[in-house]
Each structure stands twice: as C-alpha cells, then as structure tokens.
Image (cartoon, grey):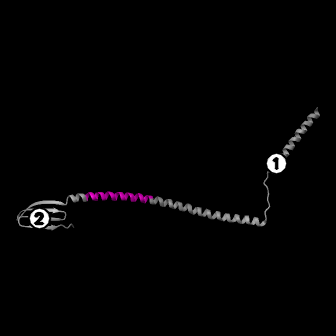
Amino acid sequence: MMCLVRLKNINILLLAVLLLWSCMCAVCGATEKTYTITESQLTQLETNLTELKEQNKTLQEQLQISKEQVQNLKTQSEQLQTQVQTLNQSLANANQLLTQYENNQQINKEKNYAIGLGIGNNGIAIAGDIKNTWIVADEKTVILGYKFKF
C-alpha cells in the first residue's frame, strides 16, 4: 500500500513539474518577436527618426512663439478694453455736456427778446431788442441797430 501512496505522490509531483514546464514554455513563447532588417532599412529608419526630432524641435519652438503671441494679444486686448471703457466714459461726458449746451441754447433763445422804456431829452423812449437787432424810438427819432458780441 505504501508503494501505491508513493506512486501517487510521484504522479502528482510529475504532473506538477509538467504543468510548471508548460507554463514556462507559454511565458517563453510570449516574449517579443524579433525581426531582421537590412542595413539600408535601418539607415532609413534612423534618418526618419532624425527628421522627426528636428520637426518636433521646430514645432516646439513655434509653439513657444505662439504662446508668447497669445500672451501679448491678451495684454493688448486688456489694454484695448480699458481704452474702450475710457472712451465710453468720455463719450458719456461729452453727451452730457452737449445736452447741457443745448439746454443753455434753448434758454438763450428764449431770452433773445427784450423791451425797454426810458426817459430822455426828447421825452419817453421805447426800445425793443430781437435777437441781434434792436430799435429805439422816441418822439422825434427812430434808431435801428445791430448788436455784435465781443
């Protein structure tokens, strides 16, 4: 019976070794495949790699320049926005001043008429003033004139 137990143990041990060996073969078979290339193909690959590196370097430099340009444009945009705000404020102030001027002109238009009475050597005189033209009349004289503002 002992012989049978030993035989069973040997079978189990042999089965374990075979299982381990098949796993090792599967792992060894899973390694990367190797290829052979000619010297001209290798040279072409190296040339392509060098060109790609140079292109990458050029593109990196252009990217850096573009980033700097974007930053400059952002700064200019902020400055222009500030100028626009200043100009809008100036425009609002100018509109306010224009409105005040127009209101003053309207008031001045309303004040362009005047009538006066006076007593002089010739008696009572009456004077009228319409815009820049004036007239004075008394018993003997009528005077018509034009005003100039200095």
Q: Is residue 121 visible?
A: no
Task: Quickly name the residue at label 2.
Answer: 136
Instruction: Give the CA distance from mark 2 to mark 1.
Output: 129 Å
In the figure, is residue 20 to the left or right of 69? right
Residue 63, picture quadrant: bottom right
Residue depicted at 41% across the width and 57% down the height: 85
Circle on res. 121:
none
Q: Position of residue 11 (x, y in %)?
A: 90, 39
In the figure, is residue 147 to the left or right of 126? right
Q: Position of residue 145 (x, y in %)?
A: 15, 67
Residue depicted at 70% across the width and 65% down the height: 48
Q: Position of residue 36 (x, y in %)?
A: 80, 61
Circle on res. 26:
1
Q: Is residue 139 magenta?
A: no
Name the image quarter holding the N terminus. top right
Q: Is residue 86 magenta?
A: yes
Name the image quarter holding the C terminus. bottom left
N-terminal label among 2 and 1: 1
Q: Give the residues drawn in magenta, as a range.
A: 81-104
In the figure, is residue 2 to the left or right of 104? right
Q: Is residue 116 visible?
A: yes
Residue depicted at 82% across the width and 46% down the height: 23
Q: Nearer the viewer, residue 46 or 78?
A: 46
Q: Residues within 10 Å of mark 2 (few under 14, many from 20)?
A: some
**Image vertical order of residue 20 relative to residue 89, above or below:** above
Residue 59, picture quadrant: bottom right
